Image (cartoon, grey):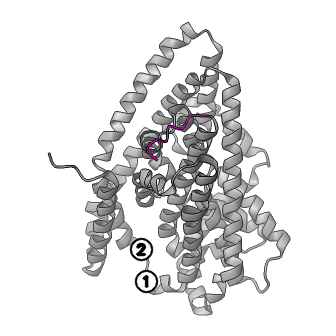
Amino acid sequence: MKKSLALHWKILIGILFGLLFGLMAKNLQLNEFVIDWIKPFGTIFINMLKMIAVPLIVVSLIVGLADLKDISKLSRLGGRTVVFYLFTTVFAVSLGLFLANIIEPGSYINQEARESLLSNFSGDASQKIEMAQKAKESGPLQPLVDIVPENIFSALSDNASMLQVIFFVILIGIGLILIEEEKAKPVVAFFKGMNDVILKIIDLMMLFSPYGVFALMAALMVEIPGFSTLGALGIYGLTVLLGLLIMTFLFYPALLMLFAKVNPIQFLKAIAPAQLLAFSTSSSAATLPVTMECVTERLGVDEEVSSFVLPLGATVNMDGTSLYQAVAALFIAQAMLPYPLDFATQLMIVITATLASIGSAAVPSAGMVMLVIVLGQAGIPEAGLALIFAIDRPLDMCRTVVNITSDATVATIVAKSVGKLNNQNI
């Protein structure tokens, strides 16, 4: 019997063919055809993944927490997860600032390119600034208030309210741990059955993934701005990519070898389908079902760990986004301010970007809104956001890969620390 091609190869082929088809369509002036007849299939694929993300979080987290059978285990799991997430985020922001200070990408933007970008993307920038203004007007403890939903059914219907869903589901999990085991058993059995059903639905969805990513890539190519404009932003883009590559191929492998004794090559091979899907969808939330499957089935992380660490990570752990915010803030400052930012201002960027990444929704371009807050805090003109809009989408795809790689890394390390990593295959 002929062996089927592995999923990550199918997704990669879909990405490559999509890029080639999109480039060909752009040259043949078939942009409208791609947007009207090809792009909708990519949108359908993302919608399917987002559709299953919240049900997956609810059932897997309840099952995982109920299996802990002990509140002290939950606090130990939660404490280690938060510490590692904060550590990787602070490192990502610091690395971004270091690279931007060394390379100085803003100094490569000439006056003509600056004026062209500001005029072409000022409308997009204004929209993001307005959204960020609303976020800034709320009090300092608003993020804490936002964690507690006033209506759980409303939160369940909105992927951007994932943190509220996690809060509510953790309360259910704690309740199941605290009541008598006999009473909890039928509830846990129901959710275990639902968990199996949802995982099977994800398997069915993934059959469509090569076609979905083909449509997404083709649409990306026809919608991308003129390549002459992109040329002026090349150094900025390369600075962000260099940071993301260091995170993926040096920082995370070092953490895995140090704390989990895991082979980094085997790790990257195991999560390749999730990385490729993250690249094509630009959404940690949409990729979450596949990330959970890769981490549980291919890395050997116990479900009670992955079902807690990964949904939380998809909401609060945005290493790629944090690094990009640091580079982007300095790039805009270098391009628009007549003086360099001092150390104290850059230190505040580290703190603000770390906190902002926790508030970033796990959806495409949410980092842009949070970047406005980082810029405002550092005294950098928010209008400079227009400078980076032209290549935000490709960089968004790359930083989403780092976001989910970080989630998988922390899940593996936490699982190892609590004796829940069956890594005989890696």
Would you place residue 66 above or below residue 114 in this image? above
Q: Amino acid at mark 2?
A: Ile
Q: Can residue 40 be seen in this snapshot?
A: no
Q: Secondary structure at mark 1?
A: helix
Residue 181: horizontal and vertical position, in percent?
A: 57, 10
Total numbered labels: 2
Question: According to the image, label 1 marks what residue?
Answer: 227
Residue plotted at (58% across, 29% down):
169
Per the image, the residue denoted by label 2 is 224
- Label placed on residue 45: none
Drawn side of residue 300 relative to residue 66, left or right: left
| Residue 290, image quadrant | top left
Picture coordinates of residue 11, whole percent (x, y): 33, 57
Residue at the location (62% across, 72% down)? Answer: 385
Q: Start and end of the magenta stretch?
A: 419-426
Percent x, y of residue 330: 70, 75
Query: Furthest-right residue in view?
Result: 344
Q: Main secondary structure of the magenta part?
A: loop
Q: Residues within 10 Å of mark 2 (few under 14, many from 20)?
A: some
Left or right of residue 2, residue 300 in this image: right
In the displayed structure image, the side of residue 355 where residue 277 appears, left or right: left
Is residue 424 found inside the magenta-colored segment of the image?
yes
Q: Is mark 2 in CB contact (under 8 Å) with mark 1?
A: yes
Q: Residues within 10 Å of mark 1 (few under 14, many from 20)?
A: few
The answer to whether residue 139 of the structure is visible from this angle is: yes
- Point 44% across, 42% down: residue: 289
Image: 58 above or below 354: above
> Residue shown at 63%/58% (left/top)?
131
Q: CA distance from mark 2 to mark 1?
A: 8 Å
